[in-house]
Image: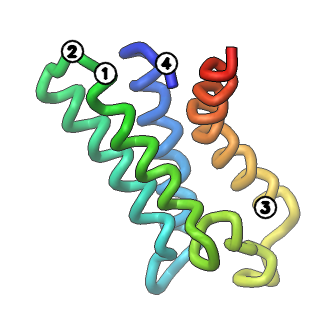
């Protein structure tokens, strides 16, 4: 994954929107994958606040947490908003998918660049 400081800030904001949405949907215990997204956001925040320069040191940590957020059976891919919240409208489900895709693009881009 090749990202610069500005993209890192954008990723942090995307993660912030995603975690806020999940918190707003879940009134009880938060799903496992929420904690992985929150850890990613916090690691970026620490990296920026500490004034670190080498983004390449942070990338493996973010990739680890992204992969962990997609663990079999407890990952985000198994989160069904309609099943968990039958009264949620379709737009809510689409909004969640858009938020998730907004974060995922940073990791998918890395795979595409690695193949070149």
Few, some or many C-alpha atoms within 10 Å of disc 4 (few <14, some 14-19, many ≥20)?
A: some
| Element carrying mark 1 | helix
* Tags 4 and 1 touching, CB below 8 Å: no
Real-space CA distance between mark 4 and mark 1, rounded to the nearest whole angstrom: 9 Å
| Element carrying mark 2 | loop
Residue carrying label 3: 93
Q: Nearer the viewer, mark 1 or mark 3?
A: 1
Real-space CA distance between mark 3 and mark 4, rounded to the nearest whole angstrom: 29 Å
> Which label's residue is closer to the chain start, 4 or 1?
4
Residue closer to the observer: 62 or 87: 62
* Tags 4 and 2 touching, CB below 8 Å: no
Image coordinates for residue 94, horizontal then vertical, percent: 81, 53
Residue carrying label 1: 55
State the residue at coordinates (42%, 49%).
64
Residue carrying label 2: 53
Real-space CA distance between mark 1 and mark 3, rounded to the nearest whole angstrom: 33 Å
State the residue at coordinates (70%, 55%).
96
The type of colouring in the image is rainbow
Image coordinates for residue 76, horizontal then vertical, percent: 62, 65
Real-space CA distance between mark 3 and mark 2, rounded to the nearest whole angstrom: 37 Å
Q: Nearer the viewer, mark 3 or mark 4?
A: 4
> Which label's residue is closer to the chain start, 3 or 2?
2
């Amino acid at each position: 994954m090749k990202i610069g400081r500005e993209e890192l800030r954008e990723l942090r904001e995307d993660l912030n929107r995603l975690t806020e949405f999940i918190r707003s949907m879940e009134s009880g215990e938060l799903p496992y994958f929420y904690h992985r997204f929150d850890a990613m956001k916090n690691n970026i925040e620490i990296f920026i606040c500490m004034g670190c320069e080498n983004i390449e040191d942070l990338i493996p940590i973010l990739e680890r947490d992204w992969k962990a957020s997609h663990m079999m059976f407890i990952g985000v891919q198994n989160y069904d908003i309609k099943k968990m919240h039958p009264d949620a409208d379709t737009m809510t489900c689409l909004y969640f998918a858009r938020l998730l895709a907004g974060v995922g693009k940073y990791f998918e881009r890395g795979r595409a660049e690695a193949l070149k």
